[in-house]
Image: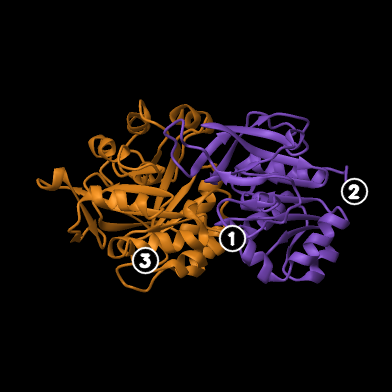
Chain colours: A orange, B purple
Amino acid sequence: MLRSRIIPSLLVSQGALVKTVNFQEPRYVGDPINAVRIFNDKEVDELIIADIQAGITGIGPDFDLLKRISDECHMPVCYVGGVRNEFDVERIVSLGIEKVGFSSSFIEDPAIVERSADRVGSQSVVVVLDVKSTPHNNGYEVRQRNGQLVVNRPLVDLVQDAGRFGAGELVINSIDREGTGLGYDLILADQIIDLVGIPLTFLGGAGSLEHISDLLNGRESLGAAAGSLFTFKGRHRAVLLNYPSHSVIQQLGK
Amino acid sequence: MIGVVDYGIGNVAAFLRAFGQMGVPSMRVTSPEDFDQVGKLILPGVGAFDWAMNKLDSSGLRPKLNEYVQDRAMPVLGVCVGMQMLFHQSSEGSVLGLGWLEGSVTRIATDQEELRLPHMGWNTVQVTGESTLLEGLDGHEFYFLHSYSVQTPNIDQIKGLTIYGGEIVSVIEKGSIYGTQFHPEKSHQSGCKILENFILDTSHA
C-alpha cells in the first residue's frame, strides 16, 4: 500500500538555511548542504526546499545551490522559489531534482503548469499555495510574495486550476500556522481534499508527531510536511535537525 | 565500470554518488566511445515519455546503446521512464520506445477507485518470481513517482508487483535487460541494495 509521506521542509534565503514564524523574522539555522546530508542519513521520505528570496528579488532559482543539493541527495526533493517558466523547470529537473514547484508564477499564469508538464511530465510539476484565514471567501484566501499580497481569486478556483492544468502535486501551506507548532489546519485540509484528484501535501503548524497523526488518521494517503518540528528541539528551540525512525514513520504513514 | 547513460535527463549524479558510496567505479556515458569502457549500463529517466526519447535520440547515444544492449547483451537497468523506454510505445506520447521488451506503457487505471495520480511516494514491492534485482528485498518500500505503467504479455518477465488501485509492474527482468518503475537511487538503503544486486550479478558476464 502507498503510505503517507512525512516531509521535512527547509527554507533557504541567500544560500543560508533559515526558519520563519508566520512567514516573518527569518532566523539563521545553518547550512543547507549540511542539512541535506543530515536528512540523507536519517533516510527521510522526501524533502521540500523553498527559497524565500528567489521570487521576491526576481533573481530566480540558485541553480548552483540546487546542483549541489541534488548531488548530495539520496531522497526525492521538491524545490520551490522563484521558478519563472517551463525552462527553469526543465533545467532544475535536469539537475536531478524530482519535483519543481510554482507559486506566484502559477497564480499569474496557471497555464505555466501545462507547458511545464508537456516537457517534464506532470509528476514533476508542483503547485504551492500559501493560504491565510479571512472572514471572507469561505474562510480562506491565497496570498503570494511571501504572504504579503492577497490574490483576488478564490482558493477553490486555484486548487481546481492546479488539477486542470496538470500539476502532479498540490502543496497547501498555512500562513496562520507556519512556525507556530499549533497543529495543522484540519478544516482547511478537509476543504481541499475533495476538490482535486492529485497528491496533496499540507505544510504549516506541525509541532509534534501527534499533529502529524491528527492529519493522517482517517484520511487517505497524504503528504505531511513540517519545518520547525524537524529543525528545532526542546523548549528553547535549539537547532537540532531531527526525524523519526523508519518504524515510527511507517506507523504514522499507514 | 558501470556507465550511467547521460542524455541530459537528471538523476545521473545521484547514481554516480550511490556507486561512489558503494566503492564501485562508475562514469557518465556521454559519447558513443564511452560504451567501450563500461561493463554494465544504467538508463535513467524522468519526465514525459516523448521528452525523454527525444533527448535520447538527440544525444547521439541511441545507436551504440542499441548495439551494446541488443547485439552484445550488455546488462542494462532502466529506471522509471528509463524502464518504460525499454518497451515499444507509450500512450503518454507518440514517439516509439526502444522496443527491447514486448509490451506497452499505459496510464494507471483510476476508474474503479478514487486514486490520485501520479502514484507518488513510498510503496512496497512483492516479489513474484525468481528475481536478481529483488534478492533479499521482498516487501521492502521504494520511492515511486509516475502516472504511467508497463503492460506486458510476458508474465514470466514480471519480477515485482506493487498495489496501487490494481497491480503495477514494478520490476521487470528479461535476460540482461532489467527495469524498475521506482527510483532505486532515491530509495535509501533498499535502493542501494537493488543497485548492488544489479552490479554483483554475474549471470551475463
The residue carrying pointer 3 sits among few (fewer than 14), some (14 to 19) or many (20 or more) residues within 10 Å by Cα, namely: many
Judging from the image, what secondary structure is the residue with disc 3 in?
loop
- Asked if residue B182 lies left or right of residue A127, the reply is right
Front position in the image: B107 or A155: B107
Q: Chain letter of disc 2?
A: B
Residue B64 vertical placement versus A215 (above, below): below
Front position in the image: A81 or A44: A81
Q: Chain letter of disc 3?
A: A
Rendered location of residue B8, percent (x, y): 62, 66
The numbered mark, 1 or 2, whose residue comes first in the sequence reads 1
Name the amino acid type tagged 1: Asp
- Quadrant location of the N terminus of chain B? bottom right
Query: Do we see residue A67 in this rendering?
Result: yes
The residues tagged by marks 1 and 2 sit, at their Cα atoms, a distance apart of 32 Å
The residue carrying pointer 1 sits among few (fewer than 14), some (14 to 19) or many (20 or more) residues within 10 Å by Cα, namely: many
Residue B19 vertical placement versus A253 (above, below): below
**Which numbered mark, 1 or 2, is in the foreground of this view?**
1
- Asked if residue A26 lies left or right of residue A5, the reply is left
Residue furthest toward the left?
A135
Query: Do we see residue A45 in this rendering?
Result: no
Front position in the image: A67 or A236: A67
Rendered location of residue A224, percent (x, y): 39, 39
**Tag of residue A92:** none
Question: Which residue is disc 1 drawn over?
Answer: B50
The residues tagged by marks 1 and 3 sit, at their Cα atoms, a distance apart of 27 Å
Labels 3 and 2 share a subunit: no
**Tag of residue B205:** 2
- Asked if residue B106 lies left or right of residue A131, the reply is right
Judging from the image, what secondary structure is the residue with disc 1 in?
helix
Name the amino acid type tagged 3: Gly
